[in-house]
Amino acid sequence: MATNGYFAHTSPITGNQPNLMVRNAGYPLIASFPSAANNLESLACQFTSSGGGISYAAATAIRNLIVDTGVSPPGHRYHLLAWGGSQSEINFYRQFREIGVGYVEGFRPESPFSAGTPPDGSGAYYSIHTGVRDVSNPWLTGVVFNDTNANGRYDLGEGLAGVTVSVTGPASGTATTNNAGGWSFQASAGTWNLTCSGGSFAGSGAAQAVIATDNVEVDFRSGQASGDVNFGTGSITPPPGGGSTGGGDSGGGCSTNGAWTPLLLALMAATGLLAAWRQRRSRA
């Protein structure tokens, strides 16, 4: 999209749709999803006619997709929050266990797209893919962060990279946090003991998680000896309210402006974080 200047689920260059794209990239998507379809992708972009470049804040993109202004039904909201207009739709979205987020900057999208017209301007694009496999074990997943404002929750810029989360139980292994502090470990049913240490994490943290069929979220706060399992411990201060200023994209449509106080940055922190929240929500 950023290279060729278009904004669409179906590529006008190859004709491929998202289900096939993720398969071509090596992801073992569940076989029941047809290749000529989109069952897993939400897109957001921001653009300008200027060639000087543009960026798109993660918080703004997530906010615009969740609010889904002007989109009826709000398909991006349904997709990302595992909700829907019917129980069958809700059940469909709740089967996803994994999530991947991509961001790139390049040319603005042309409307209508023409392969013979050179792209110009500047565009910034997010793609959010959810995934499920034919054999889909649950995940231990979470985020490691330094709670600098002591509000009990992960905020933008608080993630700690290069921290080791060690896991023992039915199997053993380790995961290293990414640049945003996110980590994931594919697990199985049973009791798991986790420890967190290294990098810029102060001291060490520990937690125990019991998995049946659902993903389990385990977060570690630097300097805290106990991890938070399924968001279950610690005092959380509600975030301040926020609203968009100027324009905003209509949940996957393009926009030329937008700003927002971060509320859902944890969705971007770890590849399995949203899936863990979904599974927890399904038990509520």
Image (cartoon, grey):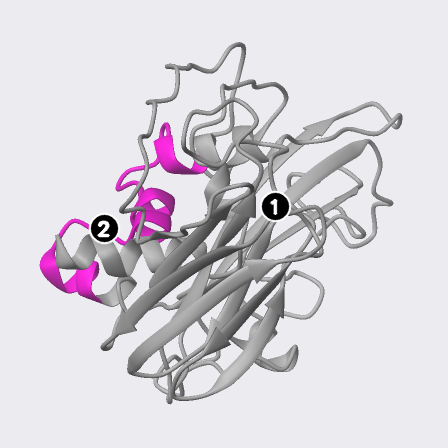
User: Can you identify the residue that label 1 sits on?
Assistant: 126
**Tag 1: amino acid:** Tyr
Q: Is 99 contained in the magenta span?
A: no
x, y percent for residue 76: 38, 46
Give the extent of the magenta segment. 65-91
Mark with earlier residue (1, 2): 2
x, y percent for residue 249: 51, 28
Question: For numbered disc 1, what is the local secondary structure?
Answer: strand
Q: Is residue 218 above or below residue 70?
A: below
Residue at image point 56% right, 42% down: 222
How packed mark 2 is, by other alpha carbons closer than 10 Å (few <14, some 14-19, many 20 or more), is many
Would residue 68 be seen by someone viewing this image from the given angle?
no
Q: Is residue 187 above or below residue 145?
A: below
Residue at image point 60% right, 69% down: 175
Dividing the picture into quarters, in which one does residue 110 lie?
A: top right
Q: Is residue 281 above or below residue 55?
A: below
Dividing the picture into quarters, in which one does residue 109 lie?
A: top right
Q: Which residue extends farthest top?
A: 246
x, y percent for residue 214: 27, 70
**Tag 2: amino acid:** Trp
Question: For numbered disc 2, what is the local secondary structure?
Answer: loop
In the drawing, what numbered circle is on residue 83? 2
Residue at image point 41% right, 52% down: 227
Determine whether, in the image, residue 187 is placed left or right of residue 16.
Answer: left
Residue at image point 41% right, 80% down: 187
Asked whether 32 or 236 is in front, the reply is 236
Mark 1 → mark 2, Cα distance in angstroms: 21 Å
